[in-house]
Amino acid sequence: MMAAAQDSPVYLGFDFSTQQLKVVAIDENLNVVHQNNVQFDSELPEFRTQGGVHIHGDRLTVTSPVLMWVKALDLLLDKVKRAGLDFSRVRALSGSGQQHGSVYWRRGASETLQNLDPDQDLHQLLQGSFSLRDCPVWMDSSSTQQCEDLQAAAGGALRLAHITGSRAYERFTGNQIAKLRRTQPDEFQDTERISLVSSFAASLFLGGYAAIDYSDGSGMNLLDIRSRTWSEICLEATAPHLDQLLGAPLPSTSVLGPVSSYFVRRHGFSESCSVVAFTGDNPASLAGMRLQPGDIAVSLGTSDTVFLWIQQPRPALEGHVFCNPVDWRAFMALLCFKNGSLTRERIRNECAGGSWELFSAALRDTPLGNNGNIGFYFDSMEITPPAVGVHRFDSDDNKVSSLSPAEEVRALLEGQFLSRRLHAERLGYSIITGTRVLATGGASSNQEILQVLSDVFNAPVYTIDVSNSACLGSAYRALHAPVADSGVSFFDVVKKAPEPQLVATPHPTAQEVYGQMLKRFARLEERVLQEPRPLSSSNQSV
């Protein structure tokens, strides 16, 4: 931790994630001066969550107790104060919340929020303020019928994606609202405002209902991502008078107002401390990683996630397009691939004796383009594209049952990264001069894997520490928003942050090899998708 001067300004970034509530404090030079957290399961055992959630008997319904989040904030602020951070130094604060979770405020809650007694904890004061005590979160998949209804009302899945940035997903808030209205009509009738987890958290600090920001709002299947207003078609298909329950959405860079007098009197915040619109955890991570136009971030984990900065979106049946959290004129996209590190480990075990050193040697010993061999490795049913099984092709596009161990290693990695690039480009991403690939996650420590990534994208690869990217992104946004209206860009504000490390540059022949290979890969993927699916998701060749 950097020790900041005792009276220098501080900016806070909160992250209301699935399993914990975190905070990071930075100074004007972007140094982290304090960080802290509250773990829900262990520090708030009375709520009886596992991994921060309640999984219901149908295994589809997944909720979290809203008062747990409120009590966690009480605990966290006490911890930070005990650690010696003077809240009077905080000039602005922002935050993020797990995307797609929703909170339902009971009639009369607005008045309660405006008249909080500073002698009591928030969770005591707000005990009766929620019409739904357990709220649906992103892990919930119980609203399939509502998804079908919404897509039908919008004119099909692709039409809905063109309006809202995504086809209908069970976890998305619009479908959760429609389900609640049908299954719990009394609770729905008793609701005066619906928040996302992000805008709910901002409301606590504001002492009034905070607007939903454009970026997190685009994960609801309700916002028209181009006009940045609620879609009439989607609202009507979801619930009557829904626009009144949601309030008008605002740019993610909005300063919502000063912190509530409750925080001034109870915790010593300055009356001039600004509350900046909170956003979703994925948009906040984009801010924390400081993605720029043309950049792509690839997280190589159990599942691989790809974040994109795009100017002209082309929403599709796969992936998600959101409004950009740091530049309201731009967009961000998100793609998730289920077969990530576990598939890489299986091929390492089968073809490289369980050794990453031998796996890396196989990549060094095989040429770019792998002599024309291409592989698709879907050990479990993939999200993007929806396919399963292992499919190998030789240089003449004939299916083959096996490759040499070294070719198998390269076919796996080239196939994974060609897939990431192909589906990113289908959403509107294009590699431009100055494009950087930012690699994170476990596999980003392997130099040879990063070299293949650099070659396939024909762009330099950098590594970046993103252990707290949502929190940091929220703190950066708190620093930027107060000057955003005067034309200062987000990048001007965060230019002093540590630079990502350059780790790989593309081979001179990479563009020639992979430009051609990408077209072949797209054709072969279509073939794979047209094949009948096996009865089980086995690892066998099909």
Image (cartoon, grey):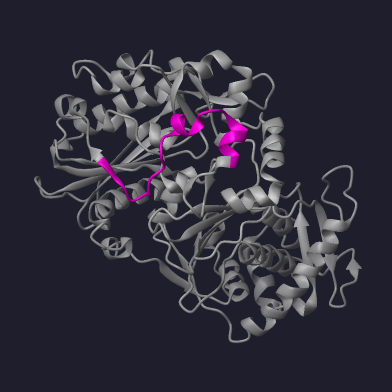
Question: Could you tell me how many numbered marks the image carries?
Answer: 0
- Is 241 magenta? The answer is yes
* Residue 78 vertical placement versus 395 (above, below): above
- Is 197 magenta? The answer is no
Q: Can residue 157 be seen here?
A: yes
Which x, y percent locates residue 154? 66, 44
Which x, y percent locates residue 86? 15, 37
- Residues drawn in magenta: 233-256
Instruction: Name the residue at the bottom extreme.
Output: 508
User: Toward the viewer: 489 or 445?
Assistant: 489
The answer to which quarter of the image holds residue 137 is: top right
* Residue 336 vertical placement versus 185 (above, below): below
At a point 67% along the width and 53% down the height, the residue shown is 318
User: Toward the viewer: 433 or 195?
Assistant: 195
Q: Can residue 342 be seen here?
A: no
Q: Is residue 309 left or right of residue 372?
A: left
* Residue 417 vertical placement versus 320 (above, below): below
At a point 42% along the width and 60% down the height, the residue shown is 329
Q: Is residue 64 left or right of residue 408?
A: left
User: Toward the viewer: 487 or 239?
Assistant: 239
Which x, y percent locates residue 304? 60, 54
At a point 48% along the width and 79% down the height, the residue shown is 433
At a point 89% along the width and 42% down the height, the residue shown is 535
Which x, y percent locates residue 498? 32, 63
Quadrant of the image containing the C terminus:
bottom right
The answer to which quarter of the image holds residue 260 is: top left
